[in-house]
Image (spheres, rainbow, N blue to C red):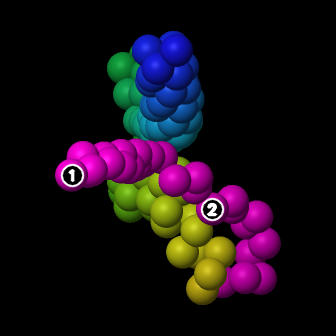
Amino acid sequence: MGCLVAVIRSSRLVVTGLNSWLMFLMTNLEAAITICFLFVLSWTPYGVLAMIGAFGNKALLTPGITMIPACACKFVACLDPYVYAISHPRYRLELQKRLPWLELQEKLPADTQSSTTETVNAPLS
């Protein structure tokens, strides 16, 4: 009977650990997809200008027009750390505390660590 209880407890801990691991992976995947999307979005103007320069009317490429892709890429490079920070749950909790008007509605994380205590009865003498 004691072994059955130990197996049930350990399987419950494994499932809880697996759920927290999957949530961790999902938040990282969300941030990675966002970063990849921003990368493609920011470098597409460079690709368009390169195609115009190689195969199109080069008179369209004025200094002002060629600065647009540079500014877009620099903006996204500055934006990337904020995307990573906002995807982190502890950062969102802190934002919710300090800026309640944002109404983030972030839930407190459950305690992922469990502790077990064992009492041992001393032999009666």
Q: Is residue 4 left or right of residue 66?
A: right
Q: Quadrant of residue 12?
A: top right
Quick one: label 1, few (<14), some, or many (20+) residues within 10 Å?
few
Stretch in magenta: 99-125
Q: Where does residue 65 sit, x and y in percent of width and height?
A: 48, 51
Q: CA distance from mark 1 to mark 2?
A: 49 Å
Task: Assign the magenta stretch its main secondary structure.
Answer: loop
Q: Is residue 90 magenta?
A: no
Res 108 label? 2
Q: Which sits in the foreground, 80 or 27? A: 27
Q: Where does residue 9 sit, x and y in percent of width and height?
A: 50, 27
Q: Quadrant of residue 46?
A: top left
Element assignment for label 2: loop
Q: Which sits in the foreground, 43 or 63? A: 43
What type is the residue that disc 2 sits on?
Leu
Above or below 96: residue 17: above
Q: Where does residue 28 sit, x and y in percent of width and height?
A: 46, 37
**Residue drawn at point x = 31 percent, y = 46 percent:** 120
**Disc 1 to disc 2: CB gap under 8 Å:** no
Residue occupying the far front of the picture: 125
Residue occupying the far left of the picture: 125
Q: Earlier in the sequence, mark 1 or mark 2?
A: 2
What type is the residue that disc 1 sits on?
Ser
Viewer-nearest of discs 1 and 2? 1
Q: Is residue 105 visible?
A: yes
Above or below 26: residue 99: below
Above or below 24: residue 83: below
Q: Which sits in the foreground, 75 or 99? A: 99
Residue for badge 1: 125
